[in-house]
Image (cartoon, helix red, strand yellow):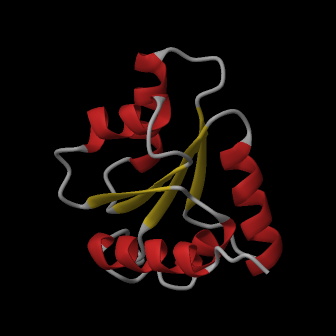
Amino acid sequence: MTTNNRLVGVVVGHGSIAASLVDAVVRITGDGEGLIPVSNDQCDRGSLERRVEDAVGTSPALVFVDMAAGSCLLAVLRRLRDREDVEVVTGVNLAMLVDFMYHRDQSPDAAARRAAEAGTHAIKVP
């Protein structure tokens, strides 16, 4: 894992959604260390792929993508599909990111499953 044995979380999204989600997580948890926003704003496919790759670096990571299709997911998959220490979850929401911040010591696979469960569980019709 990272030097402190915690996963890096990378939030990839259209426009400012990634930065806004990360900002909300920091306001809720008081901690934003290891959670990196990446936007597709003002970049072509190659630039977005490089942004994603730079954000993940060489650390094991969980990459959260805003949608299950589109440029953000394609960039993530093109650059990271061969990395065994990186998992991807689509449909990112605030609940899954907050939960992730308290469980960054898991393997990428376990963290991805937990994030998907937390995100799904948070979707309700009140």
Left or right of residue 53, residue 103 in this image: right
Q: Residue at x 58, y 80 (%)?
A: 99
Residue 5 lies in what quarter of the image?
bottom left
Q: Residue at x 45, y 63 (%)?
A: 8
Give coordinates of residue 3: x percent, y percent. Answer: 38, 71
Q: Is residue 25 above or below residue 44?
A: below
Q: Which residue is drawn at 50% across and 14% down?
A: 44
Decide if residue 5 is in sight here.
Answer: no
Q: Which residue is drawn at 45% across and 71% down?
A: 116
Q: In this view, does 44 lie above or below 83?
A: above
Give coordinates of residue 78: x percent, y percent. Answer: 28, 32
Q: Going by the picture, which residue comes out furthest to the front?
A: 125
The answer to which of 70 and 107 lies nearer the viewer is 70
In which quadrant will I find the N terminus?
bottom left
Q: In this view, does 80 lie above or below 112?
A: above
Q: Going by the picture, which residue comes out furthest to the right?
A: 27
The answer to which of 52 and 59 lies nearer the viewer is 52
Left or right of residue 26, residue 7 in this image: left
Decide if residue 44 is in sight here.
Answer: yes
The answer to which of 74 and 68 lies nearer the viewer is 68
In which quadrant will I find the C terminus?
bottom right
Residue 63 lies in what quarter of the image?
bottom left
